[in-house]
Amino acid sequence: MGEYLYAYLTYKLYNTEVFLNTTTDPAIYPPNQVSGFVSSAAGSLVFDKRNDRWSPSDGIFASASVEQAGLGGDLKFTKGLANARYYKQIFWKLVFRNNLTYGVVASPPGVPTPFTQLFLLGGSQSLRGYTYGRVGKKALTTCCTTTGALLSQPALIPYGGTQQLYYQAEIEYPLVTEAGIKGVFFYDIGTADDAIILSALRQDLGFGFRWFSPIGPLRFEWGFPIDRRDDELYQNFEFSIGSPF
């Protein structure tokens, strides 16, 4: 649509069949809520003025998309995503990188939102100080031990919210330029719930190394939750393949 502006239309058709094991609570995760055909169409706009796709050091990237499921099929929902990123080489070869992401999902009145479409944070792509999928709205369950028996007392488990908001900031710097190895210090903050409450935002700090190898970017990152809770680890290590934001 322009030198830096792109528009996309996407259609998806897929079928899902879900079976629960004996340790999963069917009252929280009903299989019929997410099993069946999904037929959806999505439209998106992307503005991309980065100087490099794999390791940008200058420029802006922004995107917005809306997906509508229910064009036939069994599952019905609407999902919107918005993302904004900013990159700047502040001095020497230090690169300041930012990523702000918001998401929302909803279903028609009286129709439950499929739990597979809800938002949870944690892991290499969002809050790096927390285990993947552990940050967000939780549900209370009494099911089940590894043998399928009821728990001795109710427990909270990650379930997911209809909204997500998170921000990532990092400083990237060269370590071994000839080998394509870089270091990074980062800070993340965000939440995933049915409402965005600023006092409920979770935070982490960390550091890592990135090797832009011949097979693609390899990331090694250690994150530390700032407001760690009793059921969370003191630190979280993430290895991933692919470009950072």
Image: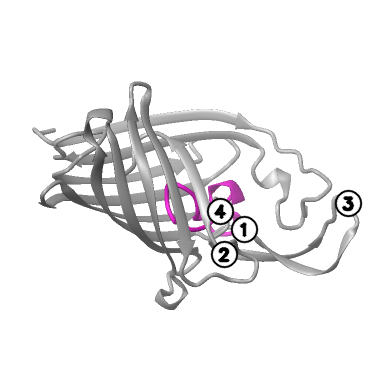
Residue 107 visible within the image: no
Mark 1 or mark 4, earlier in chain = 4
Does the magenta run of residues contain 204? no
Is the C terminus in the top left, top right, bottom left or bottom right quadrant? top left
56 or 73: which is nearer to us? 56
Work out whether residue 181 or residue 195 is closer to the camera in this orientation and state it.
181
Over which residues does the magenta segment extend? Answer: 107-130
Tell which circle, 3 or 4, labels the residue nearer the N-terminal end. Answer: 4
* Label number found at residue 148: 3
Look at 33% across and 21% down and name the residue there: 214
- Quarter containing the N terminus: top left
Taking the spot 46% from the left edge, 70% from the top edge, the residue there is: 226
Choose the circle earlier in sequence order: 3 or 2. 2
Name the residue beneath numbered marker 1. Answer: 159
Image quadrant where residue 179 sits: top left
Question: Looking at the picture, how far across and down is residue 88, in whole percent?
Answer: 14, 50
Mark earlier in primary sequence (4, 2): 4
Q: Nearer the viewer, residue 82 or 36?
A: 82
- In space, the residues marked 1 and 2 are separated at their CA atoms by 6 Å
For discs 4 and 2, the disc positioned in front in the rendered view: 4
Report the magenta stretch's main SS.
loop
Image mark for residue 137: 2
Q: Are marks 1 and 2 in contact (CB under 8 Å)?
A: yes
For label 4, the residue is 131
Q: x, y (%) of residue 244?
A: 34, 42
Is label 3 in a helix, a strand or a loop?
A: loop
